[in-house]
Image (cartoon, rainbow, N blue to C red):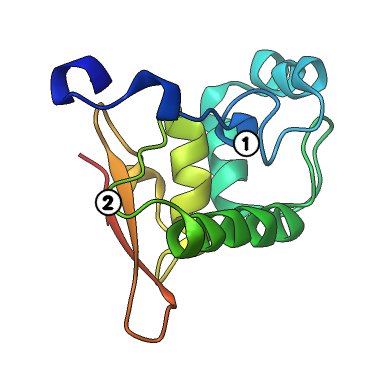
Amino acid sequence: MANHLGYPLDEIQTCKKLGDPGFFISDSALALQNWLEKGAEAVNLYLLSGRGRWPGFVDFDMAIMEMQSLIHTTLIIGRSGTHLWVTHDTILATLATRLSSGPICIEQWPSFLGRLEASLNDEENIQLSYYPI
């Protein structure tokens, strides 16, 4: 994408917060056991609800505060323009359900090219829009 848009490759930064282990997984091997033992649907429902504490996952409230702070800081002090973070549906849904105006349900699970757009309003508060499709 950067080549196509003429964006300098040396200005691309990586952030593992949206990957493995990421902002809400503390131990990927333990977290994987949840998928293997309980199934994807059960894990997805857990990610949306955030109730309880499953092995391999961090405290979601703390993780969301950290991620929200990272997004806010990036938007305030980062280079102007678009910041693009690419991740998996599980991570996007976990962020969307906690940062959006209300929780999302399993029927609003993101599909291919689903996205969460973040911008700053005039008071420098984060404004979010969720587009699951």
Q: Quadrant of residue 109?
A: top left
Residue 96 placement (x, y as % from top left): 43, 53
Q: Nearer the viewer, mark 1 or mark 2?
A: 2
Residue 104 placement (x, y as % from top left): 40, 56
Instruction: Determine whether, in the image, residue 51 is placed left or right of residue 29.
Output: left
Residue 97 placement (x, y as % from top left): 47, 56
Q: Quadrant of the N terminus?
A: top left
Between 44 and 20, the one nearer to me in the picture: 20
Q: Quadrant of residue 24?
A: top right
Establish if 14 lies above or below 121. above
Q: Secondary structure at mark 1?
A: helix
The disc, 1 or 2, on the residue closer to the chain's N-terminal end is 1
Between 21 and 37, the one nearer to me in the picture: 21
Establish if 120 lies above or below 88. below
Q: State the residue lying farthest toward the bottom.
A: 123
Instruction: Determine whether, in the image, residue 72 is placed left or right of residue 65.
Output: left
Local crowd size for mark 1, using a 10 Å CA cut-off: few (<14), some (14–19), many (≥20)? some
Residue at 50% across, 30% down: 13
Identify residue type, mark 1: Lys
Instruction: Determine whether, in the image, residue 87 is placed left or right of residue 56.
Output: left
Q: Quadrant of the C terminus?
A: top left
Residue 106 placement (x, y as % from top left): 40, 44
Which residue bears the numbered disc 1? Answer: 17
Instruction: Determine whether, in the image, residue 76 is placed left or right of residue 33.
Output: left
Tell me the number on the disc at residue 52.
Answer: none
Q: Quadrant of residue 19?
A: top right
Between 52 and 6, the one nearer to me in the picture: 6
Q: How many marks?
A: 2
Residue at 81% across, 46% down: 53
Tell me the number on the disc at residue 81.
Answer: 2
Establish if 79 lies above or below 12. below
